[in-house]
């Protein structure tokens, strides 16, 4: 019997199905007796490009994740752009300084960056009680002074700027000699230092600044090593009178570690008189080792800010009361000295 060739119609076309289902092929064993053999030719399905979602992707075939280096790269770009903008402002004079010569931008971006490695890596300063400095408004920080060279004031300035929650700037009151030295004069003004006089201190406190003063002066920074951590006389209490006039709190500050950076074992008074210095230090390394002897010893520092002493509860005429000024001055001095002794007892090593 001749085989008939049957071409089936696409019944699924009326259903709108996108995929054509081939007709089921009947096996030879299931064919009924006497039924002609039918050979069905199945038309191939139309080829369709597989969609991207239909192709399974195994874990091995998945592309590796791209590294997110854009953040670091973008940060570097921002730093470069910021540095170029800073240089442009410097060259064109498009920056501001206050009446005292303080340059906030230069201090934040350059001078603090130069002092910070010595603060963090060399002296490894530990700060305590920085929360005692108010977040806003004027305050007067009174600290001990030592170290032959006045590096304690600079480290205290970095401590307030970097560790205070409000990143406040400390405006130090410096001696006349600082503003008579070339280069040092300009740098001190840029850092916000000003002359240690009542008029400048009152103006800064009235503007809501944090002011730092070291009443020992040259008597403290130039005392012999045998008298380390023994506070010298605090003058006539002028800083207390200034705080009373402005009603700002007084914050005692104790610094341990600065006394040993240049152990002063002698004083060449004749040479100091010729040079116009209050003292000329002789240490175990200076001047015997020349410039190398000027490198400070890497001592471990601790700076602790004490509880504020309020002054806003006194009447206006209290600033002229010598007995009150004497009592407050003695209270501040005793608190600093007591904290120094406590920190020295807790210290295990000068260098570690």
Image (cartoon, helix red, strand yellow):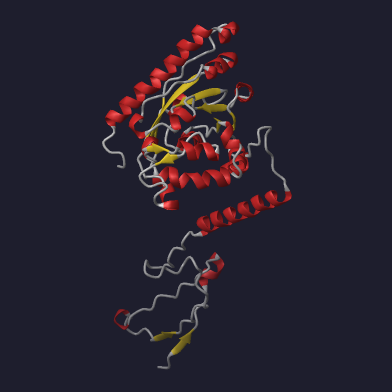
- In the rendered view, tell whether residue 184 sits above or below residue 66: above
Residue 242 on image: x %, y %: 57, 17
Tell me residue 177's x, y (percent): 57, 35
Whether residue 162 is visible to the viewer of this picture, yes or no, is no
Q: Who is closer to the viewer here, 298 or 87?
A: 298
Q: In which quadrant of the rendered view does residue 26 lie?
A: bottom left
Q: Residue at x 69, y 32 (%)?
A: 99
Q: Residue at the location (34% across, 85% down)?
A: 34
The answer to which of 257 and 68 lies nearer the viewer is 257
Whether residue 240 is visible, yes or no, is yes
* Number of numbered labels in the structure image: 0
Q: Position of residue 127 (x, y in %)?
A: 40, 34
Residue sitting farthest toward the front: 270
Relative to 45, 289 lies left or right = left
Q: Quadrant of residue 197?
A: top right
Residue 276 at what x, y percent from top left?
Answer: 55, 37
Name the residue at 63% across, 36% down. 102
Left or right, residue 296 beside residue 323: left
Q: Nearer the viewer, residue 38 or 232?
A: 232
- Name, please, the residue furthest toward the bottom: 2
Quadrant of the snapshot with the N terminus: bottom left
Q: Which quadrant would the C terminus be assigned to in this image?
A: top left
* Quadrant of residue 265 within the rendered picture: top left
Which sits in the foreground, 4 or 60? 60
């Amino acid at each position: 019997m001749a085989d008939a060739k049957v071409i089936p119609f696409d019944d699924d076309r009326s259903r709108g199905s996108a995929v054509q289902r081939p007709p089921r092929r009947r096996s030879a064993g299931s064919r009924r007796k006497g039924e002609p053999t039918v050979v069905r030719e199945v038309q191939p399905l139309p080829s369709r490009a597989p969609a991207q979602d239909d192709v399974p992707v195994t874990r091995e075939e998945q592309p590796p994740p791209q590294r997110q280096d854009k953040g670091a790269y973008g940060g570097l770009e921002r730093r470069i752009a910021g540095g170029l903008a800073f240089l442009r402002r410097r060259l064109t004079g498009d920056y501001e300084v206050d009446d005292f010569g303080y340059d906030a931008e230069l201090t934040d971006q350059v001078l603090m960056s130069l002092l910070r490695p010595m603060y963090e890596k060399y002296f490894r300063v530990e700060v305590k009680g920085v929360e005692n400095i108010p977040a806003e408004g004027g305050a007067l920080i009174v600290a001990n002074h030592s170290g032959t060279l006045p590096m304690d004031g600079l480290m205290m300035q970095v401590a307030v700027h970097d560790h205070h929650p409000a990143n406040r700037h400390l405006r130090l009151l410096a001696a006349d000699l600082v503003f008579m030295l070339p280069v040092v004069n300009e740098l001190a003004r840029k850092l916000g230092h000003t002359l240690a006089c009542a008029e400048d201190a009152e103006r800064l406190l009235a503007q809501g600044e944090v002011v730092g003063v070291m009443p020992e002066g040259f008597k403290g920074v130039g005392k012999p090593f045998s008298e380390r951590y023994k506070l010298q006389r605090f003058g006539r209490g002028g800083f207390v009178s200034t705080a009373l006039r402005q009603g700002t709190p007084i914050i005692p500050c104790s610094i341990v570690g600065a006394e040993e950076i240049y152990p002063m074992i002698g004083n060449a008074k004749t040479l100091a008189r010729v040079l116009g210095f209050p003292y000329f230090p002789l240490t175990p390394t200076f001047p015997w080792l020349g410039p190398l002897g000027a490198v400070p010893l890497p001592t471990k520092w601790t700076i602790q800010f004490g509880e504020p002493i309020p002054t806003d509860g006194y009447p206006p005429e209290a600033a002229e009361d010598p007995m009150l000024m004497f009592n407050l001055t003695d209270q501040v001095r005793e608190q600093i000295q007591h904290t120094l002794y406590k920190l020295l007892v807790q210290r295990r090593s000068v260098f570690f």
